[in-house]
Amino acid sequence: MSQKELQVIQAIEDDLFTFAEYDPQAAERVGYSDYSYWGSTLKIFFKNKTVIFFLVLMASLILFATIQPYLPGQKSPTKIHTDPVTGRPLQNQKPSSEFWFGTNVIGQDLWARIWSGTRTSLLIAIIVGIWEVFFGIFIGAIWGYVRQLDAFMTEAYNVINNIPTTILLMLLAYILRPSFKTMVIAMCATGWLGMARFVRNQIVIIRDREYNLASRCLGTPTTRIITKNLLPYLVSVIVMRIALSIPGTIGWEVFLTYIGLGLPIDTPSLGNLLNEGRQVMMAPNLRYQLIFPAVVLSVITISFYVLGNAFADASDPRNHY
Amino acid sequence: MLKYSIRRLLQSLVTVFIVITLVFLLMRLLPEEGYFGDGYDKLTPEQRENILRKFGLLDPWYIQLRNFYSSLLRGDLGKSIIYRPDVPVIAIIKDKAPFSIAFGLASIFVSLLFGLTMGITMARNKGRFWDKLWTAYVVFINAVPAAVYLLFIQLYLTGIKIGKKPVFPMLFSRGNPRSWILPLLSMSLGGIAGYALWMRRYMVDQLNQDYVKLARAKGLSNKQIMVRHVMRNAFVPMAQYLPSSVLLTISGSIYIESLYSIPGMGGLLVDVIRRQDNVMVQALVLIYSTLGIWGLFLGDILMAVFDPRIRLEKREGAR
């Protein structure tokens, strides 16, 4: 033992080794923690400067899209504007003080169409997103946890997953008229598959951990194990999926429009607008018809994506302190 | 393992059988007008009936189904009825598939190469400039729908000129390698972002693990730790996806092939469904679903090969 160590040991005072007096208040102080899961999650979430930026950006975008038609001086998204003198439609007008984003090939106001399209696309994305979350998690949890169902569900998943969505969409469009409703139904009918598989894989990973085994031995009912043991563990990964499902759904709507199975042309949506813009993109002076919808669309999807990721990070208890 | 593989393969036959039967029946539910395209109004009812009879669509559905399966068992996928009338489906696929497969494989290679390098760079510089820059790229590619950024790539990169000649031609042509670059780039952007994101997350997670500390304490060099331990572990989840993505390159990319007019398979399925070329639809669904299911299976096998801890069969004593 070196000289230095000896000194350290000698420096320890003896009264550290006497019994402490019992003090109930001090005991309380140690035992109490003001930790709350959602409280900490929100605290960490709002601490992030990028989050605040995108939150403000997205909130103002959604707010503006909602109140835009009630503002003074707004034009109808479907009205074809004509020249008051000649009576001819005002086609492909450049952005001006009259038409802020210009007009499209048949003379409709692009500004009004973009906001109307944003409302349509966001509404679809939110409805489909919510459905995907509830139904997907429900099916995924049962699929993952109940062993007897695994083979059957996997088989059903393989079958549904391999039937092209295009066929279902065409059948739906044939039975019902193509509209906002058919679009939402078709997307809900297949959108939950990815979510279900994702949740199932996560649950398979954790279902046999010791704490679940213990719960099962103590006779906890399956529903309770799923809702109290398994799903809370998965909050952060599930939140991430939800956040990604909204930009995903918007992208999907764009894709369906691209292959010609989107909403009818008289219902503006971001997919429709992008498609209209694509048709005139080879003329450099008409490119604004592609660029404006593309920019609005990208701002929306990027905001959701960034916020979702940040929230998923914040809701992971390992990042709490 | 062998018993397991055989069971999985037999299972896949059943799945494909159910899928293809369902698709067959669903196609029969579509309206008859669809078979005539735009010419519907010009035909007399007799002519329409003749055409439908020629396609064998007037028989009851179970006879149609029986005919379909009996020719399938003889190895005959049939002849296209509308897309390219009377051309065997196999010939059409032979015509188109090589383009899609070539571009698909090249893009997988490029994505792996750049994606993994990018992910490693990000993990090594966590929180610093390169990490932030590539994170911005990953977020952008993942968040913005492909339809948007692919259009802008074609629109603006084809405008780059050296002297008066554009560097990248607008459309694909087989004899001009320069026209291959943009489609390949466009096709790989998503893959690069995906692999980079995954690699970064995995590396950051793993580098703090005990086995890495132990390896370092044993005196292994950083390179050995990376290649033998971390990379091998990081590759396991990717191994699940690799076989399906390789097998499904045959289905092509719908956006990119139509943007650059590549005569590949992308969009073929959507196209034949819309034109109700039943024979083509059935053949394509058969091929894609078989490859998709086998891809999953091979992925599981590959995963077990890379990580011996993964057991595919039910373990003894497992509930």
Image (spheres, grey):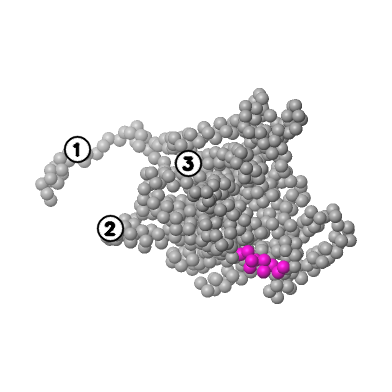
**What are the residue bounds of the magenta stretch?**
B87-97
Front label number (3 vs 1): 3
In the picture shown, does residue A156 fall above or below A313?
below
Left or right placement of residue A148 versus residue B41 in this view: left
Q: Are marks 1 and 2 in contact (CB under 8 Å)?
A: no
Label 2 neighbour load within 10 Å: few <14, some 14-19, many 20+: few
Q: CA distance from mark 2 to mark 3?
A: 35 Å
Badge 3 and badge 1 both on one subunit: yes
> Chain letter of disc 3?
A
Q: What residue is rendered at 14% in x and 46% in y?
A: A5
Question: Between residues B122 and B63, which one lies in front from this camera angle?
Answer: B122
**Amino acid type of the residue tagged 3 in the rendering:** Ala
Q: What residue is rendered at 85% in x and 55% in y?
A: B42
> Chain letter of disc 2?
B
The x and y percentages for residue B71 are 73, 73
- The residue identified by callout 1 is A15
Badge 2 and badge 3 both on one subunit: no
How many numbered badges does the structure rendering display?
3
Left or right placement of residue A85 versus residue A94 in this view: right
**In the image as oriented, which residue stretches furthest toward the top?**
A72
The x and y percentages for residue A275 are 65, 45
Q: Are marks 3 and 1 in contact (CB under 8 Å)?
A: no
Left or right placement of residue A239 versus residue A49 in this view: right
**Amino acid type of the residue tagged 1 in the rendering:** Asp
- The residue identified by callout 2 is B217
Residue B286 can be seen, yes or no: no
Q: What residue is rendered at 61% in x and 39% in y?
A: A285
Q: CA distance from mark 1 to mark 2?
A: 41 Å
Q: Are marks 2 and 3 in contact (CB under 8 Å)?
A: no
SS for callout 2: helix
